[in-house]
Image (tube, rainbow, N blue to C red):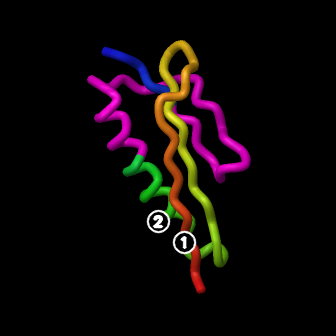
Amino acid sequence: MPRFFFDAGDGDRLSRDDEGLDFLDLAQARKAALISLAEAARDELPKGERHLFAVVIRDAEGRQLLAASLLLRIE
């Protein structure tokens, strides 16, 4: 089963994931990344007017496979 690494942060700075998680394929890892973005946004509310949440998925060789972000803006 392939291992995927999830670097997460605010778009400018990402915390590097050195442990990773095992998923059957990139589609499952993608789903987990999107859920993590939604959970991060929920956990940060209501801390400010604008916040960018980002996650980058890498494979075991360090290649970027997917980048996703969520912008939360209160007007």
The quarter holding residue 52 reads bottom right
Q: Nearer the viewer, residue 45 or 52?
A: 52
Kind of residue at badge 1: Leu
Q: Name the quarter where the N terminus is drawn.
A: top left
The reply to whether discs 1 and 2 touch (Cβ–Cβ < 8 Å) is yes
Residue 59, position as x, y percentages in the image: 48, 21
- Compared across the picture, whether 57 is left or right of 51 comes to left
Q: Which residues are magenta?
A: 6-33
Residue that badge 1 annotates: 45
Residue 3 pos. (x, y %): 41, 19
Q: Secondary structure at mark 1?
A: loop
Q: Is residue 26 magenta?
A: yes
Q: Residues within 10 Å of mark 1 (few under 14, many from 20)?
A: few
User: Residue 11 versus residue 18: which sits nearer the camera?
Assistant: 11
The picture quadrant where one finds residue 13 is top right
Queried whether the magenta region covers residue 63, the answer comes back as: no
Residue 42 circle label: 2
Query: Alpha-carbon distance for marks 1 and 2?
Result: 6 Å
Image quadrant occupied by the C terminus: bottom right
* Residue 72: image tag: none
Q: Give residue 50's position: percent from left, percent from top.
A: 64, 72
Q: Secondary structure at mark 2?
A: helix
